[in-house]
Amino acid sequence: MEAVSEFVPVPSVVLDRLASLGVDVERVLEHAGIARSRFQGTRAKLTVQEFFAFWRSLEAVGGSRDLGLRRAETPALETPALHVPHRRLQLARLRSLEVR
């Protein structure tokens, strides 16, 4: 039986994406009690409690209720490339997804 991790990986680009949608990320993190330094590198590893605190704080102080809809309308070209390990391949993947 595989051990269950007590940590939830969260891509660090989440903060940038939220900021691009007008969310006061610093306020959300402060409300959740999570240091921004936890998002250094490509992935933050949050405890389950921190993970839910983050999303609850986003709902509480993150801004408008249509955030999810606005996020869905915004192309996330960087997301698929994050799953490609080599930088050159990431750039090629992004170019192939470029909106024309």
Image (cartoon, rainbow, N blue to C red):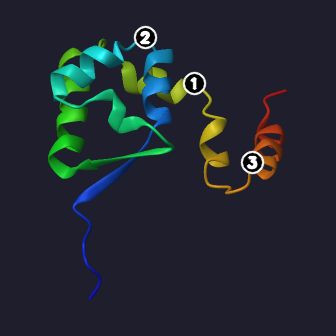
In the structure shown, which secondary structural element does the residue marked by tag 3 occupy? helix
Query: Distance between the Cα atoms at labels 3 and 1?
Result: 23 Å
Q: Nearer the viewer, mark 3 or mark 1?
A: 3
Measuring from the top left, give residue 26's x and y in whole percent.
Answer: 31, 16
In the structure shown, which secondary structural element does the residue marked by tag 1 occupy? loop
Q: Amino acid at mark 1?
A: Thr
Q: Amino acid at mark 3?
A: Arg
Measuring from the top left, give residue 2's x and y in whole percent.
Answer: 29, 83
Left or right of 92 in this view: 10: left
Residue 65 seen by the camera = no
Q: Nearer the viewer, mark 1 or mark 2?
A: 2
Q: Amino acid at mark 2?
A: Gly
Residue at 79% across, 42% down? 91
Circle 3 crowding by C-alpha within 10 Å: few under 14, some 14–19, many from 20:
few
Q: Which mark is residue 74?
A: 1
Residue at 17% across, 36% down? 53
Left or right of 85 in this view: 25: left
Residue 49 seen by the camera = yes
Query: Distance between the Cα atoms at labels 3 and 2?
Result: 28 Å
* In the rendered image, the vertical position of residue 29 relative to residue 95, given as above or below: above
Residue at 83% across, 43% down? 96
Q: Compare residues 8 and 73 and report the one nearer the observer.
A: 8
* In the rendered image, the vertical position of residue 62 relative to residue 46, given as above or below: above
**Sequence-wise first label, 3 or 2:** 2
| Residue marked by disc 3 | 87
State which quarter of the image contains the C terminus.
Answer: top right
Measuring from the top left, give residue 18's x and y in whole percent.
Answer: 43, 23
**Sequence-wise first label, 3 or 1:** 1
| Residue marked by disc 2 | 22
